[in-house]
Amino acid sequence: MEKRDILSMSPDELSAALKELNEPAFRAKQIYSWLHSQCVTSFDEMTNISKALRQKLDDNFVIFGVSIEKKLISEYDDTQKYLFKLHDGEFIESVLMKYKYGYTLCVSTQVGCRMGCKFCASTLDGVVRNLTASEILSQIYEAQRDNDIKISHVVLMGMGEPLDNYDNVMRFLELITDEKGQNMSMRHISLSTCGVVPKIYDLMEKNLQLTLSVSLHAPSDEIRSAMMPVNRKWGVDELLTACRKYTDKTHRRISFEYAMVSGSNDSDDCARLLAKKLKGILCHVNLIPVNEVKETCCKKSSRERIEAFSAILEKNGFAVTVRRKLGSDINASCGQLRRNSKNV
Ligand code: SAH
């Protein structure tokens, strides 16, 4: 019999599974608390549970956690990049950032990525597999334990496309915000997508309080399709229609990510077209000077170009920020995470 992934189970699923093992409901509550509040990594640490039951748990379940393989600390800021090893020997990366308001962890949702964006290191070797909810949670639990801190904010902006691993990501959201576990505020979570339109509609129906980030990067199909293959399936207008409906339904502001690539998507014309296309959408635009990835040849736009681009958007009434780059000396910035860091 295959052992069940206990850290991914909802409280109800855990109660039902314990009931099958003839254990009372309060045991399920105790175990859930060990897993998601104390964040233990083995059944042996559950000290208020009998040895016999601990053995029974070990026979029936497994805790699919991640373990720290390597950690790099930036010399410029307090950013830390973790290379985590998974139970099957695969690797993923997460980035811990310190802000005035607390700690944010950027988590991965897949081993690799299949979306193929031309400027991103995470997709260079394609996707290997989805992460389980437990493996997404465990990135947070391990980083907390390692630093003896509480992480208050999470961004699903590491390796992978969260909406390409929809069910596990939804389970992760349910567990991380559960008051009997970490009780993280949904408002402190950002989910970033390259634009998997049908799943944006699914997410819209859930009406969650999280922040949806959309990696837009270009205002026209011509430029966007050259940068992001996903655009050939769901074009700019189809994506922005979904975004408009999303904000209408949830009343939550969307954050549009726009990586500025010199000579590609950073002209005044692009800025004007972007302003036209985003008109009426409750949103914020985040400009990111593209980060260099050695296998791609994207060059970042100059500071002057970014300022001019930003000024056009602001003149049209948009809230714009230019993303501060953290952890660049350790390849921990947007689009620089990869599964083979061990060999880099
Ligand atoms: N797959 C999701 C989640 C990844 S989030 C998505 O595409 O949104 C990572 C963010 O960094 C995305 O906005 C992505 O487009 C951006 N990014 C990727 N490579 C980058 C690079 N080289 N420089 C700057 N941003 C990059």
Image: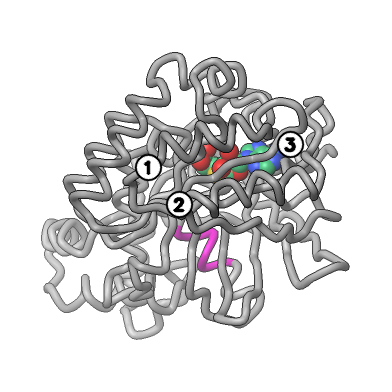
Instruction: Give the label on residue 340, or none.
Output: 3
Q: Which mark is residue 279?
A: 1
In the figure, is residue 312 to the left or right of 255? right
User: Mark 1: which secondary structure?
Assistant: loop
Contact, mark 3 vs mark 1 (Cβ under 8 Å): no
Q: CA distance from mark 3 to mark 1?
A: 41 Å
Along the polypeptide, which appears first: circle 1 or circle 2?
2
Q: Identify residue for label 2.
A: 255
In this view, which residue lies farthest toward the bottom? 48
Nearest to viewer (mark 1 / mark 2): 1
Crowd class of label 1 (few under 14; some 14 to 19; many from 20; radius 10 Å): some
- Residue pictured at 31% horizontal, 71% vertical: 52
Kindly state the secondary structure of the residue where label 3 is placed.
loop
* Residue range (magenta): 137-142
Seen in the picture, residue 218 relative to 317 is either above or below; the reply is above
State if disc 2 and disc 1 touch (CB < 8 Å).
Answer: no
Q: Position of residue 293 (x, y in %)?
A: 79, 35
Front-lying residue, 300 or 78:
300
Quadrant housing residue 29: bottom left
